[in-house]
Structure formats: C-alpha cells, structure tokens
Image (cartoon, rainbow, N blue to C red):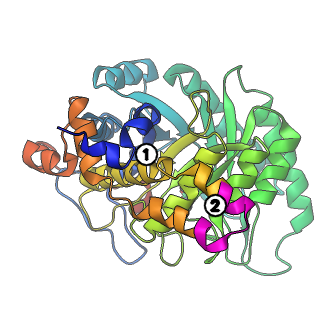
Amino acid sequence: MTDPSAATGFSSITDTLDRLAIEVPSWAYGNSGTRFRVFGTPGTPRTVEEKIADAAQVHAHTGLAPSVALHIPWDKTDDYTALREYAEGLGVRLGTVNSNTFQDEAYKFGSLTSADDAVRQQAVDHHLECLEIMGRTGSRDLKIWLADGANYPGQNDLRQRQDTLAESLRTIYDQLDDGQRLVLEYKFFEPAFYSTDVPDWGTSYAHVSALGEKAMVCLDTGHHAPGTNIEFIVAQLLRLGKLGSFDFNSRFYADDDLIVGAADPYQLFRIVVEVIRGGGLDADSEVALMLDQCHNIEEKVPGQIRSVLNVQEMTAKALLLDREALAQAQADNDVLAANQVFMDAFFTDVRSDLAAYREERGLPGDPMAAFRESGYLDRIAADRVGGTQSGWGA
Ligand code: PSV
Ligand code: MN
Ligand code: MN
C-alpha cells in the first residue's frame, strides 16, 4: 500500500513537528470575562494545583503543551519546590513567570514608570520576588507586561517615563541569573487609552537592546492595531535576534484573547511561515511559543486543546511550503507563481496526516473527541465546588 502522507510530503516534516512545544497559561483555566459579566463554569480550578492539573490534560491529549506559565500573585503558593514536583508528577513543567503590576491601588498612575519613587520601588521589588520564585520553579523567563500609560494628552511626561522605565528595567535585569531571561511585552492600548508606555515592538526592542543579551521582546498576537502586518514584525525581530516569545491568541477587534487561529487562520499560517524562515523552530531555537487566552463562554480545557491543535495544524502547513519553488518564483519576479506556491501550502489538508502522526506517538488521533470522552469535565464539576475566577475575573 502506498503511504498517503507521501502525496503531501508529510513524512519529511515530522522531526520538526516533534519539537513543537506550546506553553499554556495558568489563567486560561479560571473563569474570566468581560467588564459586563464573568460567567462561571462548573469545575473551575480553586487552586494553582488544580490549574496545573487542567493544563496537564492539554498535554496528555496532544503531546504539545509540556509547560505551564504562572502569574504572580494569582498563582502564589508557600512552597514552589513542592509545586514544581507536583507539576512534574503530572508530566508538565512550570514555565514563564508573569509579573503583575496592574491590580494594586498603588499602580493607578503607573508601576515601573511611576514618578513616585515608593511606588516604583514596590513594582521593582515585585519583579525581584518573581525572579526568586523562578529560581525555585526552574523557570527561564520573566515576562513583563505593563498597564502603565495615560488616558489624556498632557497627563504624563511621555519622554521622562521612558527614562524611568529604562532605569527600572535595568535594576531588574541586573538581578537575572545565568540562563534566565527578561521578556518585555508590548501592547498598543488598554487599559490606557491615549498612550501606553510600551506600545509597540520598536519600544520594546529599544529597551531590551539597551539591557543586553538576556532581554528579549514578547510578541502577543492580539496587541496590534487592526491591519498590522504581524508576520513582518516576526521576520524583523528574528532577523535582529530579539524575538524571545509569543503570546498566541486571536482577535477580531481589540485584545480579544480568543482561541488561536479562530479569527484568522491564514494570518496564523503567515506568522508561522516567518517563524520557520527565521529559525524559530530549529533545534537550537530559544523562541518560546505560548498561549495567552481567556475562555469566557467556552469550556476552558478543550478551548486550550483546540488552540494548541490549531498551532500544530498551521505549523504542518507552513512546514510543507515548497521553499525552493517559492525562492525560484521570487527570483523570477513571478508574482502569481510565488503566491500560488504560498497558497498551495496553506490550502493543503493535513488533518488526516496529523491524526495518523498522533496515533503513531501513542496520542489520540482526535484529541478533542478523546478529551470529551474522558469524562474529565464531569469529574472536576463534581469534585471542585466553588471554583475561583482567574485573576482577570477578580
Ligand atoms: C493584558 O493585555 C494581558 O493580556 C497581556 O497580554 C499579558 O500577557 C496578560 O495580560 C497576562 O498578564
Ligand atoms: Mn499577552
Ligand atoms: Mn493581552
């Protein structure tokens, strides 16, 4: 019998697919919502351990999500060594530590950019605490996203705040251990509506470049103005050696944090094409792929499973791109041929190849169905009474 995957060349991409690892965020499993309402879900985790248990389900069904990102203080615990062992016992690792300087009263007018020395010190100290936690959890990355900014022109000295931010980041950066990294995430608006202190990749790049080798940019796919060519930013940051990590999600309007690839699968494909082109999936790549999601109305564990599967599917398509034919068409300035090669890869149906690929690795061919049939959701609904909101719903 002929190998059906030979038609698409699927067998040539499995080594790279085997390397695909997508970190899931602890906060995706709590109840979150909009400013209108937070809808509860039966079985919502009550503790960080229960969030990790949910995350472990994503990995068990897909083989794609070997680590879980923490958010401090949402995931604070007395014993991080025990938490690490607990996670490892469930087959996952503790990953990126996300700081949080956007929920305390003190940060109303800024945190690392605050003009108030005491407030700024409080924000710096919080990051130093995160570094300490990272030492115990074995985490490599400290991810910083700041809500700092202004609602009205004239409210802040924009320029001064960049200097203050540079100083604060330097203090934190100087405390990184060998092997640890600082990743600085940008976002063009919200909660500040006029000006955000790290609004774009250029600002993040300026800061991390000044800091040094251990500082990188974090690109959240939902943090750009509509119409932004995100794959161009990916290409540029990889070219500059400064793309540290991704926060994947999808959006229709603002920072919607929807399931990855739901709003625009073709955009996800184009992004992954540039990740591969820039070496982001090479064996020695240090680009971290992460989800940053809120599941407001759908079940959370299968929501995460759907997201990592969507990344896997677009990665398979992108790996099947005939780069030689593309390069030839580009060299010939054959616009239509180049576009056709590109679209052929996007339209390749890899779903049955991926199902077979999973089964060969002892995973369910259809992880969504397998999870549904596992009865996990019913079990946690019965066991966990009084689940908490994610930090976002708090
Ligand atoms: C806020 O926009 C945000 O969604 C950022 O993307 C962070 O990565 C995330 O919260 C968690 O702090
Ligand atoms: Mn993010
Ligand atoms: Mn966001």
User: For residue 307, which quarter of the picture?
Assistant: bottom left
**Quadrant of the image containing the N terminus:** top left
The residue at label 1 has a CB less than 8 Å from ligand 1: yes
- Magenta highlight range: 328-338
Amino acid type for the residue under numbered disc 1: Pro
**Quadrant of the image containing the C terminus:** bottom left
Amino acid type for the residue under numbered disc 2: Glu
User: For residue 258, which quarter of the picture?
Assistant: bottom left
Q: CA distance from mark 2 to mark 1?
A: 23 Å
Q: Is residue 380 above or below residue 116?
A: above
Where does the image place residue 206, in percent across and percent down from the top left?
Answer: 85, 51
Residue furthest out toward the bottom: 153
Element type at marker 1? strand
Q: Is residue 14 visible?
A: yes
Name the residue tied to disc 2.
Answer: 231
Name the residue tied to disc 1.
Answer: 25
Q: Is residue 89 above or below residue 345?
A: above
